[in-house]
Amino acid sequence: MLSINKLKLIAKEARKLIIEVACLSKSAHVGSSLSCVDLLVSLYFHQLKLQKNKWAKRDIFILSKAHGAMALYSVLRLKGFISDSILRDYFKNNGTLPAHLDRFTNKAIEASAGSLGHGFNMALGMAYSFKLKGKNRKVYSLIGDGESQEGSIWEGALFAPKLGLDNLTVIMDHNNLQGYGRPTEICCFEPVIKKWEAFGWQACRVNGHSFSEIITAFNKPNKGKPKIIIADTCKGKGVSFMENQMKWHYFIVTEELKNKALNCICREI
């Protein structure tokens, strides 16, 4: 098991890759990718069972907020599933990796996603399939807080407890910024914990940038219910001039901004 300090170093490297790839590709969604890095590092370097010699028995992860694809690609690069050359051709003509996930691009991409609310329900279906087949495999999905305004999220939230999906864990990247403002102002879903509990879920809330809190939440028994972890995060985390700024849902990383951002990440403890 990796130490917290090692996980922090991996997360720092992932953030560097996101900035470099965003600059090369001139693509958006940098802030959305930076906010969920610590969650993905916790999943891929601590939680998920992904042994290559037992691939058919692996755990499943689906990034439902698929506009954060750069974060997943960067973590998969550090995990050894994606080569550096393929990563650096992200979002380019004749490249392999698109801005939203395509399951045919890499064996570690479990589902094509992009339409918000869909990946969550694909994860639910996979978890149910494993239950029906008696397989001891777990399914994880990461959703956005803005995404949680989708009706399909709440349809699935109603259905999962009915199916007894205690092999399903969902993480909400709660950075309180979406494309046109703050979810708490646009369509507030607080009290979020009480709502998920009322739907029959085991729910908890953590600091989404604290590896110890994230891992503790993963390790709590599901007690016969699907689990939701509300992870309070900061959009643009790790780059001070991007943090908590809605514009970094869209802005492009220029060469000058890339160097400034990398310097910020390097100063992070």
Image: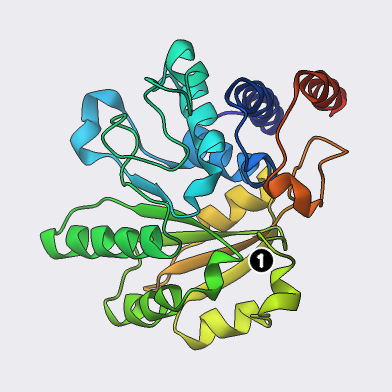
In percent of width and height, residue 241 lies at: 87, 39
Visible residue check, residue 209: no
The residue type indicated by label 1 comes to Arg
In percent of width and height, residue 159 lies at: 32, 80
Visible residue check, residue 41: yes
**Looking at the image, which residue is at 66% across and 39% down?**
30
**Looking at the image, which residue is at 64% across and 80% down?**
189
Q: Nearer the viewer, residue 98 or 217?
A: 98
Q: Nearer the viewer, residue 118 or 128?
A: 118
Number of numbered discs on residues: 1
Residue placed farthest to the bottom in the image? 198
Please tell me in which quadrant of the rendered image residue 194 appears: bottom right
Q: How is the image coloured?
A: rainbow
Which secondary structure, mark 1?
A: strand
Q: Is residue 256 left or right of residue 140?
A: right
Q: Judge whether 217 appears above or below 211 on screen.
A: below
Residue placed farthest to the top in the image? 85
Q: Is residue 69 left or right of residue 239?
A: left
Look at the image and tell me in which quarter the C terminus lies. Answer: top right
Q: Judge whether 106 appears above or below 119 on screen.
A: above
Q: Nearer the viewer, residue 251 or 202?
A: 251
**Looking at the image, which residue is at 50% across and 36% down?**
72
Residue placed farthest to the front in the image? 93
In percent of width and height, residue 250 lies at: 68, 46
Q: Residues within 10 Å of mark 1 (few under 14, many from 20)?
A: some
**Looking at the image, which residue is at 47% across and 42% down?**
47
Q: Is residue 52 left or right of residue 38?
A: left
In percent of width and height, residue 248 lies at: 74, 45
Residue with the mark numbered 1: 205
